[in-house]
Image (cartoon, helix red, strand yellow):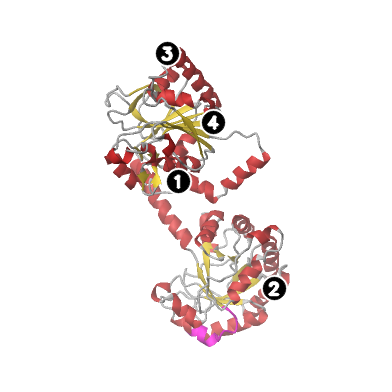
Amino acid sequence: MGSNTDSVVVDKSAQSNGSAISRCTLLREQIFSPDLAFLMEAHNGISAKIAEEVGFKGLWASGLTISASLGLRDSNEASWTQVLDVLEYMADATTLPILVDGDTGYGNFNNVRRLVKKLCDTHIAGVCIEDKLFPKTNSFIGERQPLADIDEFCGRIKAGKDSQTDDDFVLVARVEALISGHTMEEALERAEAYHAAGADAILIHSKKSTANEILEFTRRWANRAPLVIVPTMYSMNTPTQAFRDAGISTIIWANHNMRSAISAMRETSRQIFEDQSLHEVEGRVIPVKEIFRLVGNAELEAAERRYLPGKANLSAVVLAASGGNLGEMTENKPKCMIDIRGQSLLQRLVTSLSDGGVRGISVVRGAFKDAVQVPGIETVDNDRFAETGELFSLACAKDKLKGDLVVSYGDVLFRDYIFDGLMQAEGDIVIVADAKPRQGGDLVVTDKPYTGGYLDDGPVSLTSMSQALSADKATGEWIGLARFTAQGSEWLRAEIAAIEAEGLLETADLPLLFTRLAAKHPVGVHYITSHWLDVDTLTDVAAARNFT
């Protein structure tokens, strides 16, 4: 046996013109291929997508894990129509063929007929039914579970094959004789009868800690029909190559996505419960944007641009006029263009903003402006950067200060979850502040300090911001990231105009701007606790390279 790397995959371009191979055909080709095939367990749409992304060519919709995902036992407590609902989401989420664990067929031959028809309607590629009694009991629970009468189970197989609406729909008959303590001869007799009744493949099951009886069955079966195995109990003691050499058709990895999910959720829940904080957890879990990517938000955004052309887009203005003082690193380029593990600091910031949904990014350049080159950005020049301050640079981009807007310093790095939190925070103007202020930063005073308690942390408003504050008097430090709604952008432009009219624009900084805004309008504060970095010194550069 070889690898399964040449298994047929869905041609998405062919799919669009209606000529794609059906999923039933894909599954049939895998099961009847001379190459060993692998089916990965999935129990909902997101686990199906993940299995497809990592490279699996087929899925096993496990009855155990679907039931567990619903909080139910694997004893037919979930009705077949409830399982079908889950399968429909899985089929919509992936292009892969799905072999569903159909338990005993949910009843007699008539139940199997209805099940197979509905599975074909839902574009499920195949079903596996087992020769036990309804309602089923999981094979790993108890001993000597009663088996179905051979002739009656053959009737279920015939009913299923007669009811399929795709000629390539796959029906796998699962033999439970070895699981239930019967002889090898009983298992072989049942497998032969089920194959004669029309089963496309045989799943031979075992709960021994070694594969000896599976390999013996395989040898005596002599490849009369494809064999499928579920090596949950014996895979640790048997290399996969042994199954390939024996002529096994397909291996099902039956429940590990669910088991790993439970492990991860339990640990995350425990950590949050004990800490009453997200601080230790956020750096270990995927960012929210990865969920958006998996469920296809990019496609929706593309559709919105096509069908809702008037929909406002989130834009950003990045202040990167400063040259910085980092020795040789900034001799011929500004600080924002120093290398951080193969990418400029600005490129990393632009990527974070783009991944967070920002569509138009304008960068205010100043020192070594011709060196500020990042694909996909617009540039605005502050040619008076040496004699003006931050607010003057922001005012240079006044034509960009409209609609939903993000304003950021050009030397800041932050974890993706911080930006996600800022986007979800309510308010027309919201800044991000670290609840652990450092002396010398843009320190803030708010109407209430950060407590870390879920129930305590209601809306927080900015009172003032200044670098002249002492850290022990401040309630936080602005990290250089803020968001404005369309209304907030109007207030922003009006305040810049007022500061200019007072003759303060050239020397004013952003802390002054936010202090003045807070005196007139609500300015919300989204608290964080670390997981960000501004790059001002060589030590910061080293930290940035570790940060990313």
Mark 3 residue type: Gly
Whole-angstrom CA distance, mark 3 to mark 1, is 44 Å
Residues at discs 3 and 1 in contact (Cβ within 8 Å): no
Q: Which of the two discs, 4 and 3, labels the residue nearer the N terminus?
A: 4
Left or right of 527, for residue 290: right
| Residue marked by disc 3 | 503
Marks 2 and 1, the one that precedes in the sequence: 2
Q: Are marks 2 and 1 in contact (CB under 8 Å)?
A: no
Give residue 261's quadrant in the image.
Answer: bottom left
Q: Residues within 10 Å of mark 2 (few under 14, many from 20)?
A: many
Residue 408 higher or lower than 105, as above or below = above
Which callout, 2 or 3, points to the residue nearer the camera? 3
Mark 2 vs mark 3: which is more N-terminal? Answer: 2
Select label 2 or label 1 by which is in front.
Answer: 1
Q: Amino acid at mark 2?
A: Lys
Across and down, in percent, residue 299 comes to 60, 47
Spatial CA distance of label 2 from label 1 is 45 Å
Q: Residue at x 49, y 61 (%)?
A: 54
Q: Earlier in the sequence, mark 1 or mark 4?
A: 1
At which x and y percent is residue 20? 68, 64
Nearest to the eye among marks 1 and 4: give it: 4
Residue 461 visible from this viewpoint: no
Q: Is residue 258 magenta?
A: no
Is residue 331 visible in the rendered image? The answer is yes
Residue 350 in the image: state x and y as whole percent.
46, 40
Q: Distance of mark 2 from mark 3, alpha carbons?
A: 85 Å
Return the mark for residue 404: 4
The boundaries of the magenta stretch are 216-226
Mark 2 = which residue?
161
